[in-house]
């Protein structure tokens, strides 16, 4: 139990320390039927990251065809740390005869609390 608590603490510490760095790598031109959510899912970024990268959009809930959105990228180092954390947690879960966790990009974006502080 202490090991699991230690691993959980490490995961939380890494989450706090390793914020998702946003850098403009590409763009997306809005077409009819697009929503911020659909675009975020398509490019595998969080909605909060997409909004943060597009401060020129006054109302992110209302986007129009022809608008150009900046698509942020996730720092590859952050993804590597996330995968390592999943691997370490799974080692401990195997010892306790628990099922393995899988890396989930959506959950890792939710765990990034830097946008909520």
Image (tube, grey):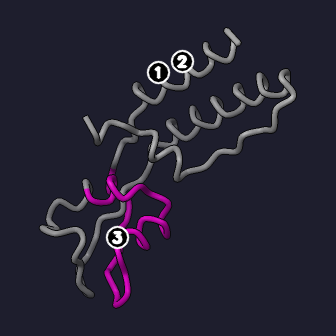
Magenta stretch in the rendered image? 23-51
Badge 1 is on which residue? 13
> Is the C-beta separation of discs 1 and 2 under 8 Å?
yes
Q: Is residue 9 left or right of residue 64?
A: right
Residue 9's label in the rendered image is 2
In the rendering, at what x and y percent does residue 56 appear?
14, 65
Q: Quadrant of the N terminus?
A: top right
In the rendering, at what x and y percent does residue 110 appear?
45, 46
As for residue 8 lying within the magenta part, the answer is no
3D distance between C-alphas at marks 1 and 2: 6 Å
Residue 44's label in the rendered image is none
Q: Is residue 63 above or below residue 1?
A: below
Choose the circle earlier in sequence order: 1 or 3. Answer: 1
Crowd band around label 2 with a 10 angstrom C-alpha radius: few (<14), some (14–19), many (20+):
few
Q: Quadrant of residue 30?
A: bottom left
3D distance between C-alphas at marks 2 and 3: 33 Å
In the rendering, at what x and y percent does residue 47 appear?
36, 59
Badge 3 is on which residue? 36
């Amino acid at each position: 139990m202490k090991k699991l608590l230690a691993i959980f603490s490490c995961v939380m510490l890494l989450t706090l320390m390793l914020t998702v760095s946003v850098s403009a790598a590409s763009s997306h031109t809005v077409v009819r039927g697009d929503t911020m959510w659909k675009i975020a899912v398509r490019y595998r970024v969080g909605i909060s990251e997409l909004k943060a990268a597009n401060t020129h959009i006054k109302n992110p809930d209302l986007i129009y065809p022809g608008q150009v959105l900046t698509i942020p990228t996730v720092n590859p180092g952050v993804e590597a740390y996330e995968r390592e954390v999943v691997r370490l947690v799974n080692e401990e879960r195997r010892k306790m005869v628990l099922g393995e966790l899988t890396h989930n990009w959506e959950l890792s974006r939710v765990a990034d609390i830097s946008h909520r502080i």
